[in-house]
Amino acid sequence: TLRENGKYLLLLSEHIYSCRFGTLLCDTEREREVVASIRQRTYCLWEYLESFPDLVNKNFSPVSMLHESDIVEHKGCLLMPLPSLLRNVTLWVDRHCMHGAKPTLRSIPIS
């Protein structure tokens, strides 16, 4: 279970390319700090997201709070073959359809 919920991930995906925050600009931390001085001119995305307490998954429990019997070790776990993974891919409607037309109900012809 992730610590963040779907709203958190949705906001993160919106701000990756928004250029509103300097956190994800440039290629390295050094470039952000020394070359571009971005920290002084922009806000931190992580601080912004942490300011919303409703973005935390209420079912999340950190590993330190779990019992040893609850932790499962995955030694030697291999990735599934790509065709198997792609069968499980679904469209993230909240993200990819957020700017489209509102869905309408399909009209059923009356016989």
Image (cartoon, helix red, strand yellow):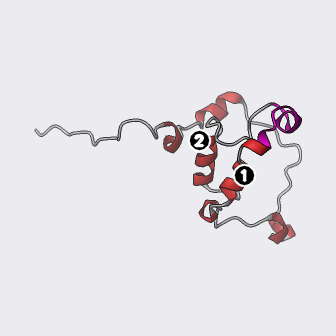
In front here: 54 or 82? 54
Q: Main secondary structure of the magenta part?
A: helix
Q: Secondary structure at mark 1?
A: helix
The furthest residue to the left: 111
Which quadrant of the structure image shows residue 22?
top right
Q: In the image, is residue 36 part of the stretch drawn in magenta?
A: yes
Question: Quarter holding the C terminus?
Answer: top left
Task: Specify whether 89 is left or right of 98.
Answer: right
Which quadrant of the structure image shows residue 18?
top right
Q: Residue 105: x percent and y percent?
A: 28, 43
Residue holding disc 2: 14
Taking 12 as reference, is 79 above or below it?
above
At 71% from the left and 48% from the top, the residue drawn is 43
Q: Residue 8: x percent and y percent?
A: 62, 53
Taking 80 as reference, is 70 above or below it?
below
Q: In the image, is residue 88 part of the stretch drawn in magenta?
A: no
Residue holding disc 1: 46
Task: Specify whether 108 is left or right of 29.
Answer: left
Task: Specify whether 99 is left or right of 6.
Answer: left
Q: Which residues are magenta?
A: 27-39
- Under mark 2, the amino acid is Glu
Q: Which callout, 1 or 2, points at the residue further toward the start of the chain?
A: 2
Q: CA distance from mark 1 to mark 2?
A: 13 Å
Q: Residue 98: x percent and y percent?
A: 46, 41
User: Contact, CB < 8 Å: mark 1 with mark 2?
Assistant: no
At 51% from the left and 36% from the top, the residue drawn is 96
In front here: 36 or 96? 36
At 89% from the left and 48% from the top, the residue drawn is 75
Residues packed near mark 2 inside 10 Å, few (<14), some (14 to 19) or many (20 plus)? few
Residues packed near mark 1 inside 10 Å, few (<14), some (14 to 19) or many (20 plus)? few
Question: Quarter holding the N terminus?
Answer: bottom right
Q: Residue 85: x percent and y percent?
A: 66, 34
